[in-house]
Structures are given as C-alpha cells and as structure tokens.
Image (cartoon, rainbow, N blue to C red):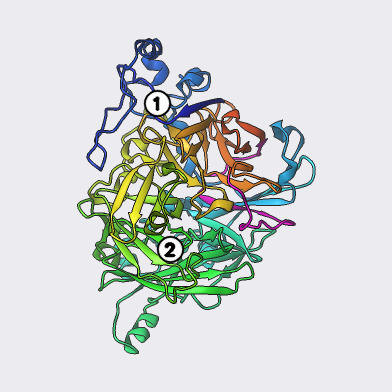
C-alpha cells in the first residue's frame, strides 16, 4: 500500500502523452482543472518514464489483464491515483455471496497490527446487495440484489467475530422456497412469463439492501423504496417489517390523489398508498436525536409527500414536520440536518409510468434524467429547532432555491448553518443566520435519457468477467465532493468543488458523528478512486480538510476495492481527529482471483499512514453500501465535544 499527503490542487499530476482521458467542461461552464498536462519538465519526464503498458494509457479503463499484467497491477505503487485497475477484478464486486458465515477471526487472521482496545465490545453493522440470481436467473441490475447484512463484533483481546446473513424478508423466504423470481425488482428484474406475468403487478420487492442502523435497542435494515426490516442485534435474523409504531402505512409508496374516502378504499384494494422510509437517516449532534422521514409519491400531482420525524434514543418522538415537494416525481436519496433546517436536494428526474404498468420495465428504469432543468435545494424548518431564538414563536418558512443545471447529487456528507469553514471564524451573525452550507457527493454531469441506463451498458472485455451486473466506469459520470452555499433569505445558490477536491473521484463521504450538522466540522472522509478526474472504482480512502484543502490519502492497491468508511469517535477523544476509520477491502490476487475480504482500521489523525490493523476474513463479501458502529457498553454523548 502507498500513502501520500497532498495540499489542495497545487500538486496535481502531469498527464502522460497517451492518457485515455481528455479535459471536460464542468456543469457550471468552467474548464475542468485536470492537473495541467506536462506543466513541469521534471514531471513530464517522470510520466514519460512509465510505459503505456504500465499505466494502461491509451486503453479503456479497467482493460488491464490481471493474469498477463499482474506484475503491473500489484507491484507498481507509483500508479496509485491514476485509476489503474482491472475490470476482471472489479466485476466480482456484484457476484453473489458464497453463503452465510459465522466465525471468529484471531491469530493469523490478523495480518498485521493490533486491534485497538478502544473498539472492544463494539459492533460494526453493514448491509448491501448480496444475492443476484434466483433459480438460475440473474437479476437485471446489481441494485436489485437481495440484502446481505454483516456484523463484526470486537471482543476483548485480539479477536473479532464475523457474521453474515441474508435479510430474509417475506418475499425472500417465498422466493427461496420456490427457487424462482416471484416479485419485480425496482431496477428491472421481472417475474418469469414476460409482460403478461408482470402487467399491472405493482408489487416490488423490499430488498432491505441499502443501510442498517442500530438505535434505541433496534437494528433496522433499510431500503428507500420500502419499510424498515427489523433484525436481531446478535444473530441478524429478520423479524419482519417495522412500521415505526404505525407511522409507515403498508402498500406501494404512491398515491393517485383520489377524493376520500373512495380514494383510500381503491388504493387499499390495489395495495397502494403506502409510505416508504428513507435509507439515510441522520443522528443530529446538537440534540442526539435520530432524524428520518417517510415518503409517498403523488403520481397525478407530480409531487412527493414527505413526513419528517425526530426520535430520542428510546424512540420517543420529539417532533415531526409535514412537507410536500411540489414538481418532484422521484424522492430525494439523502438529506442533511443543521441546527435550523432539514436540507433536501431535489435532483431533476421525470417518470414515464406506462412501461412499469405494462410490465416491461422496473420502476427505476422509468426514471428520465432532465439535465435541462435546474436542481432544487429545499430548506425545511426543523421540527426541533435547536437554533430557534427565545423570542421566536414559530419556525421560519420553507425555502426552495434554484441550483445549477445538469447536476445530480447522491450522498450528503455534511450540512451546517452559516458559510463554509473555509471562510474563517470571523463571520458575521447575519451570515451565520442567512447562509447554509452543504457538502455532497455528486456527479460531474447529468446526461439526458434513461436514468442509470449507462450502468447496464458495457462493451465486451478482453478477459473473462464474473458478471455483467458490475457497472463499467467508462460509462458512468465521475463522482466528486461538491460544496453548496444557499442563502436562505435570497435563494442564491453557489456550487463549486469542495476545497482540494477538483481532481478527485470519491464517494460515500462521512464526518465524525460528533460533528454532524456543525460548522466547526473540519474533516470529511470518503472512499477514493483516483486523482485524474475520471470515474473509477474505490481503491483507497481520503481525509479532506474543508478549511485548507489538504488531503491525506491511502491506497490499498490497484487490485483492492474499498467500501464506505465508517467513522468511530474514540472513547476519550479530545478532538475531531480522535477517531477511527473502519473500512472493508476486497483484495484480488493470483491466489484469490475472485477476491478475499479484510477489515481495516485507520487512525483518522493519520490516514496517510495506512491501517493500524488488517483482519483477513475467510471469504469475499459483495461490495456493500452503508453501515453503522455501536458500542455495547458505552454511549456516545454527541453534545459534548471540542473542535480540532
């Protein structure tokens, strides 16, 4: 593994003469700053010293043969950051898990380092798509994969228990028994029998594959197009749907808006009118409340009906808010929470429902990108407004602000009141009150046409691959960390790459849970692909300094793929960087061509030093999505912390 510290964009790389990428124009109309090619003769000489075969210059990204060019992939750390990898390796990311597991890792499984005592009696939960076929039939899209929950329990001493279990929803159990696809998937998986078997079948499977939270004695597997599924905290056994004490109505998550009471009767009979729950709830560090929201789509009105709730750690409701997102056909994917606002970004997607109703497409395949329409930012007053002045008797009105064109935002890393930390500490009270800052992982451009259509498009590869479900990054936009500034009084929106992020391709950004929603939050952690402004798989981790743009980076290898980082504050930490970054890495080699997983722990104060411990598993875990760490005998106090 190789690490590197890089300040802002000042140390950008020189491009080799036969580089496979060319400069683009950013969605905001400014030339993308790519690390100006051949800017210094010394750098040019160094770049030229690498042969095209070594770097893969001139080739399609990922087209390096892992057998013929294994030495290039495995023994050339100087290529880290250049998006050097093989799709033969990466294609295993969405091959089905090899079953369920329960074993203890110790002894030789600890490849190097020691497990920090600070993690003892803590548990990491994660979930992601894990099963991609049924009855010999491969699913249509990797996001249609059935959920696989995993659990890592850190014991006293140098031991860690690993468990994995499929989230056995009612639909999963039915399909397992029949060994065939019985339910439609959101992204195109269909029941056998063609359109006639799927025509007007509005039921879609709750995959429970996107996120997992442990809160107030509950462990819930989440899927944004369904209701939470309760899991046993110790065994991961599924215990049915949790409707959050009746807050989430059953049925598919859309309504026709027909007059009551006839409308409700019709929708109940047609299994409509239900309410799904977000897969991205947040724990607000100001109040230590869990903030989440349910939603349903008003199809005929082209609006999304949202209800937000806040709960304390005993699941007592501490506030709620209703909101209708007008002119919205697809619910937001993520959101942010500040002391004053819920921040939701509305990507511009339309829906063509006829192919779904006709049984020829999944609901997700009916989404149409609308890059010609500006992204919208919704500021919704908090149900428990931690910043409400004593003289105020009611919260401010919601704000809808117009953002840039051709934009698509995915994961919200941080939202806070006031201008960005980059502007310094000497900020006026008015600026703190007027402005809201949001950091979000989003694409560098949104293309017209069928949303996610390019994810299923790929030319043939010059070597065998595990599955065609794994997306080809040559066809996917780059994801980078954007910084939005929204004026809640005027509606002005400014967007630019976050400090130091012009050249990076990242995803799944997170901050320390102690700093969620706070302006003094200085660091964002994310999975890192490359530094040459192209789309690629995650090959390492990065810490981004929001004040200076300084980056700390660690790359696992060109044959290792890193999942979302989970940030765990240390028990007695005094600063923001007193925390651990826990990640899962899938390593590929001649010995393990399909990959073998390991868990790594990095010190957030020194990401560039690499893992303090690496724990090898006995199997490969399919590339997961989100998760959460909890301490069994220690409760974090999110309200008492100091800035680094």
Residue bearing mark 2 = 341
- Give the main secondary structure of the magenta stretch: loop
Q: Quadrant of residue 231?
A: bottom right
Q: Is residue 637 above or below residue 562?
A: below
- Residue 219 appears in the rendering: yes
**Vertical comparison of 409 with 598: above or below:** below
- Please state the horizontal and vertical placement of residue 91, each as a whole percent of the image: 45, 37
Q: Position of residue 591 (x, y in %)?
A: 59, 27
Q: Which residues are magenta?
A: 615-643
User: Is 505 located above or below residue 490 in the figure?
Assistant: above
Going by the image, does 172 lie left or right of 573?
A: left
Could you say which is closer to the camera, residue 64 or residue 273? Answer: 273
State the residue in front, 547 or 505: 547
**Element at label 2:** strand
Pointer 1 or 2: first along the chain: 1
Location of mark 1 (residue): 10
């Amino acid at each position: 593994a190789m690490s590197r510290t890089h300040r802002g964009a000042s140390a950008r790389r020189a491009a080799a003469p036969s580089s496979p990428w060319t400069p683009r124009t950013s969605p905001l109309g400014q030339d993308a700053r790519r690390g100006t090619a051949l800017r210094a003769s010394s750098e040019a000489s160094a770049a030229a010293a690498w042969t095209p075969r070594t770097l893969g210059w001139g080739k399609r990204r990922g087209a390096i043969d892992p057998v013929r060019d294994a030495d290039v992939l495995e023994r050339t750390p100087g290529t880290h950051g250049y998006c050097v990898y093989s799709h033969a390796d990466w294609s295993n990311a969405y091959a089905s898990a090899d079953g369920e597991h329960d074993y203890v890792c110790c002894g030789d499984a600890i490849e190097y380092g020691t497990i920090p005592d600070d993690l003892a009696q803590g548990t990491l939960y994660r979930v992601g798509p894990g099963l991609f076929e049924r009855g010999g039939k491969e699913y249509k899209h990797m996001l249609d994969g059935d959920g696989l929950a995993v659990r890592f329990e850190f014991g006293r001493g140098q031991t860690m228990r690993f468990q994995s279990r499929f989230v056995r929803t009612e639909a999963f159990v039915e399909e397992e028994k029949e060994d065939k696809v019985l339910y439609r998937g959101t992204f195109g998986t269909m029941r056998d029998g063609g359109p006639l078997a799927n025509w007007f079948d509005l039921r879609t499977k709750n995959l429970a594959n996107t996120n997992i939270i442990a809160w107030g004695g509950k462990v819930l597997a989440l899927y944004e197009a369904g209701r939470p599924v309760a899991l046993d905290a110790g065994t991961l056994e599924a215990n049915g749907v949790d409707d959050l004490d009746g807050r989430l109505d059953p049925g598919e998550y859309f309504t026709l808006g027909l007059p009551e009471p006839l409308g409700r009767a019709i929708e109940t009979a047609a299994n409509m009118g239900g309410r799904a729950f977000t897969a991205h709830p947040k724990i607000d560090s100001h109040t230590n409340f869990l903030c989440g929201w349910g939603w349903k789509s008003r199809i005929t009105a082209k609006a999304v009906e949202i209800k937000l709730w806040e709960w304390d750690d005993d699941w007592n409701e501490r506030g709620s808010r209703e909101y209708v997102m007008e002119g919205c056909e697809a619910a937001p994917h993520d959101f942010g929470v500040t002391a004053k606002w819920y921040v939701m970004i509305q990507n511009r997607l339309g829906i063509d429902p006829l192919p779904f109703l006709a049984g020829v497409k999944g609901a997700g395949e009916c989404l149409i990108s609308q890059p010609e329409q500006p992204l919208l930012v919704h500021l919704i007053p908090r149900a428990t407004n931690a910043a409400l002045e004593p003289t105020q008797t009611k919260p401010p009105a919601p704000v809808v602000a117009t953002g840039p064109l051709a934009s698509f935002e995915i994961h919200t890393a941080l939202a806070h009141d006031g201008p960005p930390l980059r502007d310094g500490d000497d900020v006026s009270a008015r600026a703190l009150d007027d402005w809201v800052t949001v950091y979000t992982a989003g694409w560098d451009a949104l293309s017209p046409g069928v949303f996610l259509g390019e994810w299923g498009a790929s030319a043939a590869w010059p070597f065998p691959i595990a599955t065609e479900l794994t997306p080809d990054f040559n066809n996917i936009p780059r994801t980078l960390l954007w910084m939005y500034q929204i004026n809640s009084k005027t509606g002005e929106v400014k967007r630019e790459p976050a400090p130091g992020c012009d050249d990076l391709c990242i995803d799944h950004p997170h901050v320390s849970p102690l700093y969620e929603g706070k302006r003094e939050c200085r660091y964002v952690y994310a999975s890192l692909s490359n530094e040459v402004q192209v789309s690629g798989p995650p090959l390492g981790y990065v810490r981004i300094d929001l004040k200076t743009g300084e980056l700390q980076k660690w790359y696992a290898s060109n044959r290792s793929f890193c999942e979302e980082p989970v940030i765990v504050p240390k028990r007695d930490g005094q600063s923001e960087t007193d925390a651990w970054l826990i990640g899962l890495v899938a390593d590929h080699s001649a010995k393990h061509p399909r990959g073998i997983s390991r868990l790594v722990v990095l010190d957030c104060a020194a990401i560039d030093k690499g893992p303090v411990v690496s724990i090898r598993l006995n199997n490969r875990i399919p590339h997961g999505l989100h998760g959460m760490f909890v301490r069994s005998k220690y409760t974090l106090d999110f309200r008492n912390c100091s800035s680094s």
